[in-house]
Image: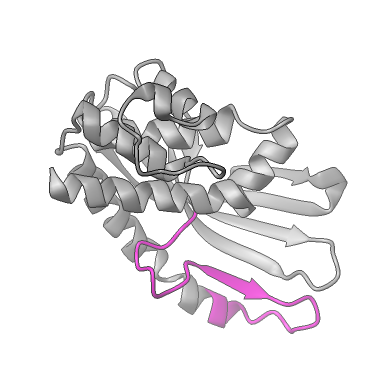
Amino acid sequence: MDTACSLKGGRNVFALAKVKESFAINGDDQIDSYLLFSNPHQYGKAIDIRFTPIRVVCSNTLTFSLNSKSNNFVKVGHRSKFNADLVKEQMGIASEKFAQYKEAAEFLSSKRFTAESLIQYYNEVFPYTHKSQDKVETVDDLSKNAKAALDLLNTQPGARYGEGTWWQAFNSVTYLTDHKMGRSADTRMQSAWFGINQSRKVKAMNKAVEYANAA
């Protein structure tokens, strides 16, 4: 076990357990594998276990499955008998998922963005909700959060790893959501792990792979 804490005034207790697997991008940019356990003390909520890679240099997190047709987490209801064997069997995919994440990260670090594709990327991850997206051509056309991610591109921790690549672009998004957005550390972490920013980071990864494939 690595870390234990609570969110939302104790309504969600969580713990991170480190898995003995890691890899490095460009030599020193290390990513470690974890399992995230959360126990919401709320009616209708279940114990939740997820695979979570964490980038060491900046503590950026991600909780999602690279296979969009499957889940990367196990839920156990409070009224259900905890079946350890079933959870072990289902979470046996963690090693496979980590290998898939490594493959995606290495791919992103090998593909470079252009100024035009980078603007379009940030616009798709952080779109305006009240105006057309058809004429986004310059930085001035981007939303506030998209501009913030762009500003972090070269100043985020670990920016030197994969400089000019989609790995750098993707990590500017995860750094923004994990460390800058939100009214407090509590709300920021809740959103980054379980809320809208968790989904946003999944989208950011998928879009980065999509742009890298086209590069």
Q: x%, y% of residue 133?
A: 41, 43
Figure check: 154 above or below 212: above
Figure check: 171 above or below 43: above
The residue sitting at the top extreme is: 155
Relative placement, left or right, of 67 versus 116 is: right
Q: x%, y% of residue 75?
A: 63, 73
The residue closer to the viewer here, 192 or 4, is 192
Q: x%, y% of residue 73?
A: 53, 67
Q: Please give the name of the residue rendered at 59% of the width and 64% of the height, measured from the top-left corner.
A: 49
Q: In which quarter of the image is the C terminus?
A: top left
Q: Can residue 204 be seen in this view?
A: yes
Q: Please give the name of the residue rendered at 77% of the width and 53% of the height, measured from the top-left corner.
A: 12
Magenta segment: 63-87
Q: Is residue 18 visible?
A: no
Q: Main secondary structure of the magenta part?
A: loop
Magenta includes 82?
yes
Q: x%, y% of residue 97?
A: 35, 62
Q: Please give the name of the residue rendered at 34% of the width and 17% of the height, measured from the top-left corner.
A: 154
Residue 153 appears in which quarter of the rendering?
A: top left
